[in-house]
Image (cartoon, rainbow, N blue to C red):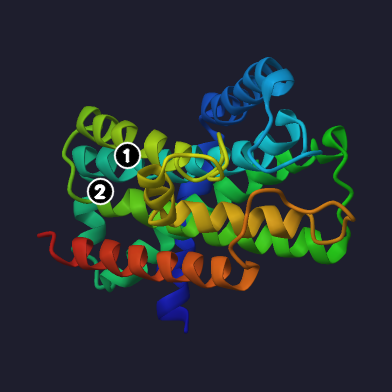
Amino acid sequence: MQGILLPITTIWWREIIRFYRQRSRLFSAIAQPLVFWILIGSGLSASFQPSGAVDGPSYIEYFYPGIVVLVLLFTSIFATISVVNDRREGFLQGVLVAPVPRWQIVFAQALGGTTLALLQGLLLLLFTPMIGIRFGVTSFLLSLGVMALLAFGLTNLGLLIAWRMDSTQGFHAIMNLLLIPIWLLSGAFFPSTGVPGWLAWTMKFNPLTYGLAAFRHSLYLDTTAKAFGEGTPWTLSLLITGLFCILTYVGATLTASAQRN
């Protein structure tokens, strides 16, 4: 067990230390989604009227779970930039020649990104009283669990791409092309009800849609209000999110295994 835990905890702790030595990452990961939430939410709140909803939530309330997911997405994905930097600085080559299986290396990196994303997501959960959500212990723990699953899957998605990249510029270009569309088409910015058929099907094939749906259901579990616009059952959303985590982790591990020392 020590041979397994020692390399995992070492790489995980290195990711934590490096993050908190770069305080600008903490500020930007929280401040940018908050600005989006306040400005866009306030601007669209008066005109937000979902299809089929007579007395629906305000846009500030509807947009909030999507902003939490955006924080998880930003932190998880951009935490994996360290893989590109480590390759350029020679640290990654030193890790690859060590007698450590690649699955442990990938798991440690994914665990580091998940921890950072979860901590920042927790900070954003402090704003729930502002929008009228009063969740209990069960809802809070389930929300944390869903957030952890989302962060783990998104971090592995970033690792899957970062292990193939040689420059941070290329990584940024690919991730910006991928990140914003999967977030916009997850139901974070607008609900799937009332959209054109082709767009509704695109949202159904987006794995982040089910992670966000599971998170909405968890937030409203202990309240009388119901999460709007999420017709997918909570259990199905959770299963698809778990499958997304497994597939991205296996893909990142196979990608790392294919890399030469």
Element type where label 2 sits in the image: helix
Is 259 situated left or right of 22 in this image?
left
Identify the residue at horizontal 85%, vertical 51% (top origin): 225
Is disc 1 surrounded by few (<14), some (14 to 19) or many (20+) residues within 10 Å? few
Task: Give the percent coordinates (x, y) of residue 255.
Answer: 20, 61
Is 114 situated left or right of 49 in this image?
left
Identify the residue at horizontal 69%, vertical 38% (top origin): 62
Looking at the image, the residue that sits furthest to the left is 260
Task: Give the percent coordinates (x, y) of residue 81.
Answer: 34, 39
Q: Which mark sits nearer the N-terminus, 1 or 2? A: 2
Camera-near label (1 vs 2) is: 1
Q: Distance between the residues labelled 1 and 2?
A: 11 Å
Q: Residue 134 carries which label?
A: none
Residue type pointed to by label 1: Leu
Task: Give the percent coordinates (x, y) of residue 10.
Answer: 45, 60
Dots 1 and 2: beta carbons under 8 Å? yes
Name the residue beneath numbered marker 1: 178
Identify the residue at horizontal 57%, vertical 44% (top origin): 69
- In the displayed structure, 162 sits above or below 131; it is below
Q: In which quarter of the image is residue 102?
A: bottom left
Element type where label 1 sits in the image: helix
Return the residue nearer the eye: 145 or 220: 220
- In the displayed structure, 52 sits above or below 135; it is above
Q: Quadrant of residue 48?
A: top right
- Tell me if residue 11 can be seen: no
Residue type pointed to by label 2: Ile
Return the residue nearer the eye: 74 or 44: 44
Q: Which mark is residue 161?
A: 2
- Tell me if residue 2 can be seen: yes
Is disc 2 surrounded by few (<14), some (14 to 19) or many (20+) residues within 10 Å? many
Q: Quadrant of the C terminus?
A: bottom left
